[in-house]
Image (cartoon, rainbow, N blue to C red):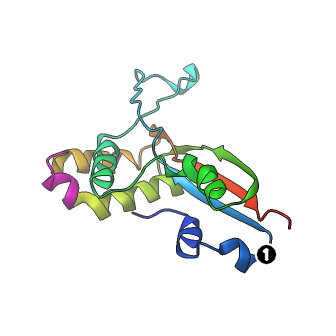
Amino acid sequence: MISCTVAWFFCTYPNATERCGAWSLLSNPEAGSWTRNLILPRCSLTQLRILEVLPKTQLALMRVVENHGVERRYGRLLPGRLRAHGLAEVGAEARIFMWQGGSAGASLMRANFQQLRADMIQAGYITEAEVEQDLARLKGFDFLTLSPIMWAAWGRRPQA
């Protein structure tokens, strides 16, 4: 699955803080909080109502990646992992964005849907027609959804 992450660095190099100096910063997107599907009735722009959607294909994608062993809540686990590796002054923060149709975020969703399309359909989580419908929605002006939560966690080697 496509994502912007540098968490692999810490996993690949357990002594990353020794190689990088005193501080390490990790970030990881988390899709664990994508659990709601809020669809408001269509309305005119003058009513200033928001249409927030969690595409069915996104739910199918989450099930597929979980089946392959992905911990969708990994981002919020980063501070504990840093502490477990002996780092001090551990902290964390998280950010979330609204993605609209035609945006870079919607393009990222499209790439993920296309990459795991066959797996989602083969598992019976979604049909070909439903994937096509969601792919079309990603282009629409009225499409609006939450991004994954982007977690950043940091810590430093304890001073000797």
Q: Mark 1 points at which residue?
A: 21
- Residue 103 visible in the picture: no
Q: Does the magenta stretch include residue 121?
A: yes
On screen, residue 39 above or below 116 = above
**Stretch in magenta:** 118-125
Task: List x then y, in percent, for residue 89.
Answer: 79, 52
Residue occupying image coordinates x 19% and y 45%: 126
Nearer to me, 77 or 49: 77
Nearer to me, 9 or 94: 9
In the image, taking residue 117 as reference, residue 156 lies left or right, namely right
- For the C terminus, the quadrant is bottom right
In the image, taking residue 64 as reference, residue 31 lies left or right, namely right
Secondary structure mostly taken by the magenta-highlighted segment of the chain? helix
Residue occupying image coordinates x 41% and y 30%: 36
Label 1 element class = loop
Residue occupying image coordinates x 28% and y 60%: 116
